[in-house]
Image: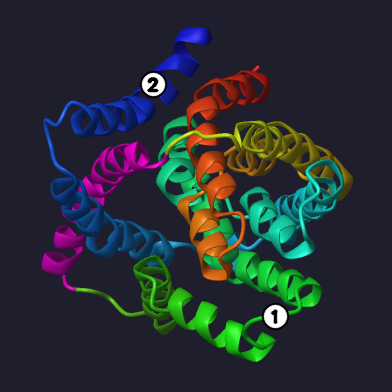
Amino acid sequence: MLLFIFNIVAPVFLFLIAGYLSVKTRLTSDMVIDGVMRFASVVAVPCLLFHATSTIDLNTAYDWRVLVAYYASAISCFLLAVISTQKLSNRRPGEAVAVGFSTLYFNLVLLGVPITERAFGEEGLLLAVTLISIHGVVGYFIGILVMEGVRADGRTFAQTLTVAFGAMFKNPFMIGLILGFAVNIAGLQLPQMLLDFINMLKQAALPCALFGLGGILVRYKLNNNLKEAGYLSAIGLLLHPILAFLFCVLVGLDGLGRNVVVLMAAMPAGVNAYLFAQLYSRGVGTAANTVLLGTGLSVLTISAWLYILII
């Protein structure tokens, strides 16, 4: 069993390590990593998401129990993080929301997709894509709503919504998802030549994205925000999947659906958590540390959750 789990998780994190070491040892440069990451994020991963949403059965894909179990647990963790960082770290409300966002917006695409696919196959991947398809909208809406409710300076709520959602819907991941849904809903039959092209790009998506993500992590440094980053990582890596499991029980979700929800809930904070902090110029150091520390620790926590789910 342990060997089976190791074989699921290890290749994913070996790509991260390879990317990290290639930059750390100067085998590749930041420019090369930026190019790899741009290819992955602008071309290859959108093709992967396009393929998934263009072929998914929309009549059965969106199980309300999957969405409720995942997002109820994520929002609960976010609110807990905001309140507790205010009390424990004496953070101002806006700072607490900025750093707490790392417990709401997780790395579902670059880590969640490859691990879920390796663990639960194509059927598990399609369930993961249903979560990803609304991840940006839910995450940014809740984050902005709470931030604008507690801060007293800067942009108006409407202005911030315009900036954030404008950027989000220019995001290549969202474009890939939207185009895939459009093809699916319209019932379009794409030429075989184009399908083969998309499939070839899809196969390159996750290796390139993981290697590039590993290289980018070199840019983040652990500093004196380590204690707070560790606390936030614990909420995301441990409490979030526990709550997700409990919500699955409450809504009567079991089997593959429960396993995918819990596994996706076990993912570390995504780079967008850092970008959200930058958007408001609050808690940027802690957000960066949470992304770095959470990604490093997740190799252990994800393996543990896989063991629990599979046995």
Q: Amino acid at mark 1?
A: Asp
Residue 107: x %, y % from top left: 50, 48
Q: CA distance from mark 2 to mark 1?
A: 45 Å
Choose the circle earlier in sequence order: 2 or 1: 2
Image height check: is 204 above or below 5? below
Q: Is residue 38 left or right of residue 277?
A: left
At x 35%, y 65%, the residue is 50
Q: What secondary structure prevails in the magenta region?
A: helix
**Label 2 sits on residue:** 10
Q: Amino acid at mark 2?
A: Ala
At x 47%, y 74%, the residue is 168
Q: Nearer the viewer, residue 25 or 164?
A: 25
Q: Is residue 126 magenta?
A: no
At x 80%, y 72%, the residue is 150
**Label 1 sits on residue:** 153
Foreground mark, 2 or 1, reads 1
The region drawn magenta spans 191-220
Q: Is residue 6 left or right of residue 252?
A: left
Determine whether the residue tagged by mark 1 lies in a helix, strand or loop.
Answer: loop
Determine whether the residue tagged by mark 2 lies in a helix, strand or loop.
Answer: helix
Query: Badge 1: how crowded within 10 Å, few (<14), some, or many (20+)?
Result: few
